[in-house]
Image (cartoon, coloured by chain):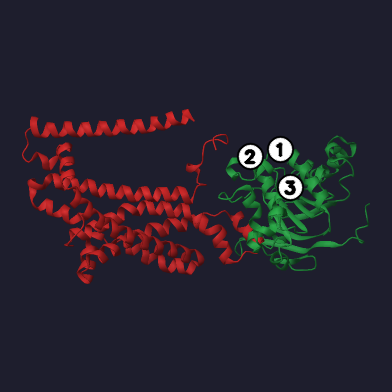
Amino acid sequence: MTGRLFKKFGQNGTFVLWAAAILLLWEAGAWFIEDIAQLTAPASKLPYIHRVLSSLVEHFPTMIKQGAVTFGNSITGFVIGSAIGFALAILMSLSRTVENTLSPYMIASQMIPIIGLAPIIYGIIHDAALSRVLMAGYVTFFPVTINALRGIKSIKQEQLELMRSYAASTWTLYLKLKLKSALPGLFAGLKLSAPLAITASIIVELMGAPDGIGVLMVSSLYYGTAQVYMFWSTVLISMAIGLLLYLIITLLERWMTPWQPEFRSKGRDET
Amino acid sequence: MHLSQAAKKAEIIVDQVSMRFGKKGHEVTALQNVSFKIYRNEFVSLLGPSGCGKSTLLRLMADLLEPTEGQIMIQDEHPREVRLRRKFGIVFQNPTLFEWRTVKQNIELPLEVLGQKKSQYSALTEQLIEMVGLSSFKHYYPWQLSGGMQQRVAIARALSLDPPILLMDEPFSALDEFTKEKLQLELLEIKRKTNKTIVFVTHSIPEAVYLSDRIIVLSAHPGRVHSIVDNVREEGDPSHIRESERFHEMMKTVRNCFYEESGFLDGQTI
């Protein structure tokens, strides 16, 4: 027990040390650019991190409010996109014809650059919230489908033969075997698409939406050096939103697929 | 005790079965004109080198494959009927446990698929868990168990629907020698208690001789029945069979089938 505690502290300790080293390097870099090399507009290149943080604290209420708008729409689109993606994976696993028919369109859909698609969507529906949801869903479904389908296809022949020997119906086969086998892939897909969903929402905001963290980002850029710390704060907030979503997925994964090798405790005695 | 075979009831009839894989022109013949009978409550091994089609034969009986020619009848029915009525349990070389299920849940899988209520079968599962000696491991997950324990779970799972027939495809060949001998002994014990008809695929001569009432010796390329060895296992304490004179005589008899076989193939191999 104490051994594990120390180990845990050791891991966290290493993380804290690394974070501190990176922040220190950042500060040193900013100091070099601003005070030693005396470059013009030093804050646009690499601002002092403490000033970014103090700006973040100062504008915190606005940041959180706009961040929440972005996060809320992203997660709605993300959930809808994942559900559609998972349903597509199941559909494609049911029939090879469906898989062969849908695959080319799905792949083609991912070739459209989101930076080009976002203004089109926004131009058509003129609703920032709905556009964000649509774009987040659009970038989410593909990685989810591909990875979940791969999970279903990786089921061992003997497991299928076993279910066949029980004369299991298609419904039971999915319930007891295929959906479970799809879960690790589903989560791999979710982890890939989570940051994409946030980015897609922000891109919609850059294209002229009235609210969201992306609007703060673009307006602080507009004001040049005066708002540079604000700009960096919005970048930090966007990062935080992405990490939050990623964390939620990781926790869900641990809860729903505890049998995966990476979640297993090391020995019998520790459990 | 040994009744004449005519008086016994044929449980499985394999009649002129041939099996070819692959596209026309590039066909591989896995089985050619295979015929034999397996009687009720018998322990029969399908013994042969790799490539003799013994696993294919088992899959044909389980309706996991369909023969190119010939037919198989189990209890006077097509294997499909038998499968749909869940009249056989199957054990593979790989334990094939579902890794998200505990020992108990894995054993209950067929019962769940059948749609029975938990209250109906929980006593039965406990009994099965005890029979395979895993009472203190019933809440463990497959990855927490040794290979031998996993295979015990697979055997209990195959017995959970209490099918009259047990099909086993090299179930012990991935285990170490000690575990193998222990599980072979346990299987004989299960056979004694449940009196199932067991079809056991193996490539090990001592294993087949130790376990079987009858051995169907298959030869490879293409798979055919080479010979059938009767009255293999003697009555008596199974833990001492391996030391008996008769066991070694039987080993010699069965091994000779293969020497003879390799002799007419090219005179060199073994």
Q: Residues within 10 Å of mark 2 (few under 14, many from 20)?
A: few
Chain depicted in green:
B
Residue B92 position in % (x across, y down): 67, 51
Q: Are marks 2 and 1 in contact (CB under 8 Å)?
A: yes
Name the kind of residue labelled 3 in the image. Answer: Thr
The residue identified by callout 3 is: B202
Label 1: element kind: helix
In the picture, measured across the screen, residue A193 lies left or right of residue A24, that is right
In the picture, measured across the screen, residue B41 lies left or right of residue B119, that is right
Q: Residues within 10 Å of mark 3 (few under 14, many from 20)?
A: many
Q: Are marks 1 and 3 in contact (CB under 8 Å)?
A: no
- B134 vs A269: above or below: below
Residue B14 position in % (x across, y down): 78, 62
Mark 2 or mark 3, which is nearer to you? 2
- Marks 1 and 3, the one that precedes in the sequence: 1
Q: CA distance from mark 2 to mark 1?
A: 10 Å
The residue identified by callout 1 is: B179
Residue at 84%, 58% in the rendered image: B40
> Chain letter of disc 2?
B
- Marks 2 and 1, the one that precedes in the sequence: 2
Figure label count: 3
